[in-house]
Image (spheres, helix red, strand yellow):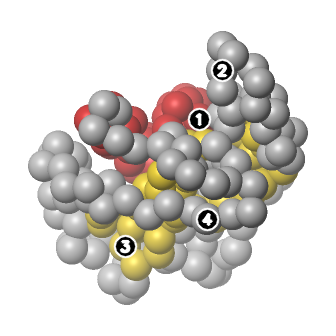
Amino acid sequence: MNYAHNVAIDVYKRHTADYEGENMPGRAFMNVTDYSNEIGTTKLNTATIDAANFTAQGGLLTALAASTEAIIRGNVAGLQLQIPTNGGNIAPTNPDAQIETTWLILYTDDSPFLDPGTDLVANPGYGKPFQLSWPCAEYAGHLTTASDEADLTNADMIAFVNALEALMVSPYGGDIVVTSIQVGAKDN
């Protein structure tokens, strides 16, 4: 799939009690279409998005979308920081591509400080666990034997985890580390 960099900004900021001012995480969204042409959306926190890093964040989101294709049955239908995708409105040909079949991604905030290099602003989210649901999961070839756990040594999973960790930050703004990916909800 060709992910064009015809980029228009559409960023949402998460307002939490732990953040004030301009350094809140940005937001990225990835829409996935299933066989029934339903759309599931994954919402991601990203680094604060501004004119200086917008193109780089768009590139990271594009790389994440490309790596997602190998681990889901559905089609990536659209990205926001608004990055349109070719074929995004076309339903997948695989009838098992259902938004209700998900990956459950567990991750932690891995940044003790929110101001790397200075280390004066402690990160209240450091070490906290979070989870994320990813629609249209493709389990075949991606699970460890007799398990509901993804095989994180699988090449598709390695590419996905690397792309996700490069783009996403926790709700507090710290870097993330994926700790586990497992079967989420199943539609079969």
Q: Earlier in the sequence, mark 3 or mark 4?
A: 4
The residue that mark 1 highlights is 165
| Residue type highlighted by circle 1 | Glu
Extreme residue in the top direction = 117
Rendering quarter of residue 173: top right
**Mark 2 to mark 3: distance in Å?**
38 Å
The dot on residue 15 is 4
**Mark 3 to mark 1: distance in Å?**
23 Å
Question: Which residue sits at x=59%, y=35%?
Answer: 165
Residue 120 location (% of width, % of height) = 77, 24
Extreme residue in the front direction = 21
Quick check: 46 left or right of 126? left
The dot on residue 99 is none
Vertical order, 86 against 91 (above or below): above
Label 1 Cα neighbours within 10 Å, binned few <14 / some 14-19 / many ≥20: some
State the residue in front, 29 or 160. Answer: 29
The local secondary structure at tag 1 comes to: helix
The dot on residue 116 is 2
**Mark 3 to mark 4: distance in Å?**
28 Å
| Residue type highlighted by circle 2 | Pro
Question: Which residue sits at x=69%, y=32%?
Answer: 114
Quick check: 122 left or right of 143? right
The dot on residue 33 is 3
State the residue in front, 18 or 175. Answer: 18
The local secondary structure at tag 2 comes to: loop
Q: Earlier in the sequence, mark 2 or mark 3?
A: 3
The local secondary structure at tag 4 comes to: loop
| Residue type highlighted by circle 4 | His
Vertical order, 62 against 13 (above or below): above
Say whether residue 52 is visible.
yes
Q: Earlier in the sequence, mark 3 or mark 1?
A: 3
